[in-house]
Image (spheres, grey):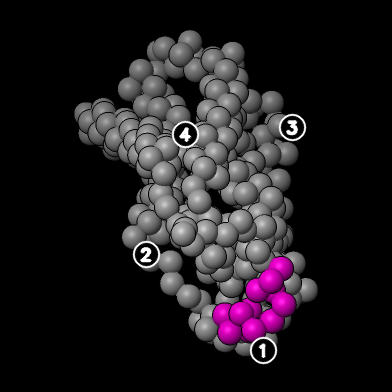
Amino acid sequence: MKNETSITNFYLLPFSGETRSKPFITAFFFLIYVVGVLINSSIITVICLEVQLHKPMYLFICNLSIVDILFTSVTVPKLLHMLLSGNHIVSSAQCYTQLSFFVTVGAAEEILLFIMAYDRYVAICDPLHYHRILSYRNCSLITIGIWAVAFLNSVIFVTSILNMSSCHFHIIHQFYCDPKSLTKTTCTTSQLFIVVNFIEILMLAFIPLMCTFISYFQIFSVISKMKTRESRKKSFSTCSSHITIITIYYGAAVIGKGLPVTPAIGANTDRGRYHSGGCRQSCR
């Protein structure tokens, strides 16, 4: 007989069970969320209102700001609700909806980072054809394509997780429903999920990253051949911020993939409270 249960709710354990630190954590995340939304909203507003910024690179920066707003809006408000209400129960519908938005935005960001690298490649290595290759029409189609691919990837990825059998284990040691934690709640790993996960990593992580490396290799080759120091400095300055973003993004992704999903500090206390209370029944 299979040890499987139809899970209708999940229980999120993001932080320690100690209540003394929760007001500080709540205020900290609220401040970070508000500041992040305001900064990115300001960037979007300036780019939309300033005609001189209606260029391919700024269109992609505008989309990157939208991605940042969506990323935080998908995860932080629910965390604040949990901290303020003390209710850590999330329905499976809410959990998988959050996951689908999270995967969509994540895929869009990965593709955007590669497209921004390609933009710098064309601007520095093939400047005479820049406006033809990255015309307004082409950039609009690229942007639509990015979000369409990201949405399609999310539908396929979430469907592959839903295809797996759920176990009795429905505690998620995270403050949101992320793919790694959700797969820990399943009894079996389906072949569909393995294939989808492999294709996603290959198409949306490995290949874009390799293409980004190749683009910057060509960029640095061209910059190194420039005659004046001023021209080299000016060309490199247009790429430095993007290089920093890529380093932080993929560095965090590698660390996140490598770290095991372990109970949060104080999680054992919450686990005991969870199993001894009514939540154990309501989460099934």
Q: Residues within 10 Å of mark 3 (few under 14, many from 20)?
A: few
- Disc number for residue 197: none
Earlier sequence position, callout 4 versus callout 1: 1
> Mark 3 belongs to which amino acid?
Leu
Q: Is residue 218 left or right of residue 89?
A: left
The residue pinned by badge 4 equals 111
Asked if residue 238 can be seen in this view, the reply is no
Asked if residue 119 can be seen in this view, the reply is yes
Q: Which residues are magenta?
A: 271-282
Q: Within the magenta stretch, is there residue 13?
A: no
> Mark 4 belongs to which amino acid?
Ile
Q: In this rendering, is residue 263 above or below 224?
A: below
Q: Nearer the viewer, mark 2 or mark 3?
A: 2
Q: Position of residue 9 (x, y in %)?
A: 66, 61
Q: Residues within 10 Å of mark 4 (few under 14, many from 20)?
A: many
The residue pinned by badge 2 equals 259
Q: Is residue 249 left or right of residue 106?
A: left
Q: In this rendering, is residue 158 above or below 223?
A: below
Evaluate if marks 2 and 4 touch, with contact meaning CB atoms under 8 Å apart.
Answer: no
Q: Position of residue 254 (x, y in %)?
A: 35, 55
The residue pinned by badge 1 equals 20
Q: Residue at x 40, y 13 (%)?
A: 128
The residue pinned by badge 3 equals 49
